[in-house]
Image (cartoon, helix red, strand yellow):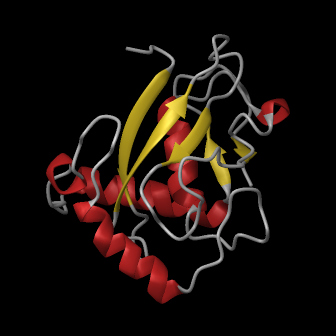
Amino acid sequence: ENLFEWHFTVRGPPDTVYSEGVYHGRILLPVEYPMKPPNLRLLTPNGRFETNKNICLSISGYHPETWLPSWSIRTALLALIGFMPTHSAGALGSLECSPEERQRLAIMSLDWNCPQCGIKMRDVLPQIEKNEDTKRLIEEVKNVSCKKTVPLEENSSSPEIGKQIF
C-alpha cells in the first residue's frame, strides 16, 4: 500500500544472545531515497531497542550527514544486525536488559506475529542450513559487528573502503 514503508525480517546475529531470534521491522524510506537515509524500526520485542521507534544509527535517518547513497537496504540491515550485540551506552531508543532477558525474548520472537502484515516469525525463515553461502554471510555479519564499519556495495564507484557506522 505504501511504497515508502517496507517490512523486513532478519535473524539475530550469530554467537550472541540474539542468535536464536527472528526479528521483524519496518524500513521507512524518505521520498528522496537513496539520496537520504531510511529510518529503521524493530517491531519484535528484543531487549535491545524500543519497539516501533526509529533506531539511532549513523546509517539511519538520525545521522543523514554520514549516509552514502551507494549504500543499499541490505547494507542498512547488515549494520542493524551488527549493532544489536553492542553496548547501548544510552543511545536513543536503546534498552538496558540483561543477557538472559534478551535471550528469552529471542526465543519468544519465533511466536511473535506482526500486527500490521500478519506474518508469524516461525513461518517466515526456515531453519538455517549451514552451507557455504550461509557461512560467508555469517562471517560478513560478524565482520560488520566487530569492525563497526559498513562495507560499500561491490559495484560502488566510491573509493572509500568502508564507513564508520556507530
Picture coordinates of residue 84 (x, y %)?
Answer: 56, 63
Q: Is residue 5 left or right of residue 60?
A: left
Q: Is residue 21 left or right of residue 152?
A: left
Q: Residue furthest front?
A: 115
Q: Is 126 drawn above or below residue 64 in the view shown? A: below
Residue at image point 14% right, 54% down:
126
Picture coordinates of residue 23 (x, y %)?
Answer: 38, 55
Q: Quadrant of the C terminus?
A: bottom right
Q: Is residue 27 left or right of residue 163?
A: left
The answer to whether one can see residue 20 in this image is no
Residue at image point 33% right, 43% down:
115
Q: Is 21 drawn above or below residue 126 in the view shown? A: below
Please identify the quarter of the rendering in which residue 163 is found: top right
Residue at image point 76% right, 56% down:
92
Q: Is residue 93 left or right of residue 135?
A: right
The answer to whether one can see residue 64 in this image is yes
Picture coordinates of residue 48 (x, y %)?
Answer: 57, 67
Looking at the picture, tell me which residue is in the foreground, 148 or 108. Answer: 108
Looking at the picture, tell me which residue is in the foreground, 87 or 115. Answer: 115
Looking at the picture, tell me which residue is in the foreground, 64 or 148. Answer: 64
Residue at image point 77% right, 39% down:
62
Q: Quadrant of the N terminus?
A: top left
Please identify the quarter of the rendering in which residue 160 is found: top right
Picture coordinates of residue 29 (x, y %)?
Answer: 58, 23
